[in-house]
Image (cartoon, rainbow, N blue to C red):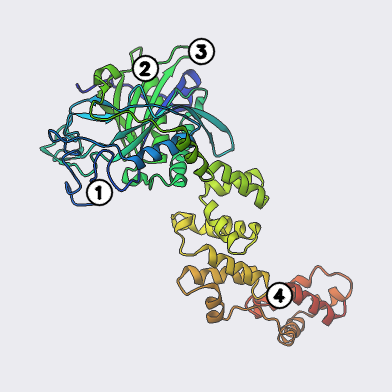
Amino acid sequence: MTTASAPTTALVDYDDAVRRYDPVLGIEVHVELGTRTKMFCPAEVEFGAPPNTQVTPVSLGLPGALPVVNGKAVEYAIRIGLALNCQIAENCRFARKHYFYPDIPKNFQTSQYDEPIAFDGWLDVELEDGTVHRVEIERAHMEEDAGKNTHVGGSTGRIHGAEYSLVDYNRAGIPLVEIVTKPITGAGERAPEVARAYVQALRDIFRVLDVSEARMERGNVRADVNVSLRPSPDAPLGTRTETKNVNSFRSVERAVRYEISRQAGILDAGTAVVQETRHWHEDTGITTAGRVKSDAEDYRYFPEPDLVPVAPSREWVEEIRASLPELPQARRRRLQTEWGYADAEMRDVVNAGALDLIEATVAAGTSPAGARKWWMGELARRAKQDEVALADMPITPQQIAQLQGLVDSGRINDKLARQVLDGVLAGEGGPEQVVAARGLEVVSDDGALLAAIDEALAAQPDVVEKVRGGNQGPVGAIIGAVMKATRGQADAKRVRELVLERIGA
């Protein structure tokens, strides 16, 4: 393969680019399956194992080593296909995809080409404002992962300019499913959002299906993002670029935006976009050229002679379908109905990553309104302030349920509850322990309240006269003084009742 080069052009403002060009996307998502062993051999799979310790003659591509298909990987691939509304092939086979790179020791990747295990599916993805965009799925096929190259020396960490490279074959042969979309059209200026939402929806599905840990930071889920521009929606598709191995939702969105602006600049200059792979740079937010993009014929696909076709029975496929868990979109709709949240409220909960937290808090005995009040209010504010994810706050749903229970029982009020929250977040124990240690329980003894009320009335005789004259507005000043004297531990409603009784109003 030769390294591609493209003319250096000025970026076009994104809003201007999408006004004049119609972006079309294609997304290929690779998910590492969470099987115990590799796709075609019994080598164990363990993240972080010492280099080249999880290998067999098959994963090293040694002569005479014969592969055997991992049945659990086939099951996981069918689960993914069914969740994506795909048809499951009655008969499919593996193929050899030829290319030379040192992380593929046998010089071909065992994949699927014209006979994937799943095909013709779709996934509806919801954007943050509730807009739904349907993404058509071309195929979901099984294959094996490559090893990992570490390029030493040079300034970029890539092979060009490196002094030497190290290869770890632990990852070689780990089972993958690659999900390929049909051209994603009609997204317009929202194309980056659609790309992000689609990859995120897939990640959520993988986790619910329990087919992968789906940790993007570990490379369990990787996205190759294809972008092309055309002058109008009825024009032929433009030349695409493929930005490889983007491994965060934010980066998927940013990479699409950058490529749209970059390609618009190339087209405005009257030159042609080069069909190539590109590398995403998280630090600078740009893509750079990799190699000229190969077409299918360049890989010289042919059927894998060492593996028999895979023919899942219809009975097995239906058993798998019946065992599928509730998928994320269906779960969100069910919970919204059960909780009585408005559409905007539910979107806020999902976007904040609070869905699981609120569900667990409700399960612990709190009302949906009470759970939402804490997670989307005080805790969301503090998480943003501390720049941490809501789920990483040092408090559990069970503790929030206990906190709200103390409020509901009248033992503390909302103001005291925030002080209790401070204590829990500071590691002082659960809500009950913090209330006891800090002495935060509401003062319910009328005798103690009356003493504080008499002191406040004596200090503000003018307010007393106004209230006695029929103007109850100033009574808030008396209540405020009592709340201050009791350090906020009085029940404001009960204080008001006693003040009015004392004054005789």
Residue annotated with mark 4: 491
Between disc 1 and disc 4, whose residue precedes? 1
Q: Nearer the viewer, residue 389 or 462?
A: 389
Residue 413 visible to the viewer: yes
Mark 1 is surrounded, within 10 Å at the Cα level, by few (under 14), some (14 to 19) or many (20 or more) other residues, namely some
Q: Which of 335 and 284 is in front in this view?
A: 335
Element type at mark 3: loop
Between disc 2 and disc 1, whose residue precedes? 1
Task: Report the mark closest to the observer, 1 or 4.
Answer: 1
Task: Report the mark closest to the observer, 3 or 4.
Answer: 3
In the rendered structure, which amino acid carries the disc numbered 1? Answer: Glu
Q: Residue 211 carries which label?
A: none
Contact (Cβ within 8 Å) of mark 1 with mark 4 = no
Task: Report the mark closest to the observer, 1 or 3.
Answer: 1
Is residue 156 positioned above or below 239 on the image? below
Answer with left or right where residue 189 lies relative to residue 499: left
Is residue 240 positioned above or below 427 on the image? above
Residue annotated with mark 1: 44
Task: Report the mark closest to the observer, 2 or 1.
Answer: 1
Residue annotated with mark 3: 234
Is residue 486 positioned above or below 377 on the image? below
Using the numbered discs, state the Cα–Cα distance from disc 3 to disc 2 in whole angstroms.
Answer: 15 Å
Answer with left or right where residue 7 lies relative to residue 126: left
Between disc 2 and disc 4, whose residue precedes? 2
Mark 3 is surrounded, within 10 Å at the Cα level, by few (under 14), some (14 to 19) or many (20 or more) other residues, namely few
Residue shown at 55% from the left, 41% from the top: 329
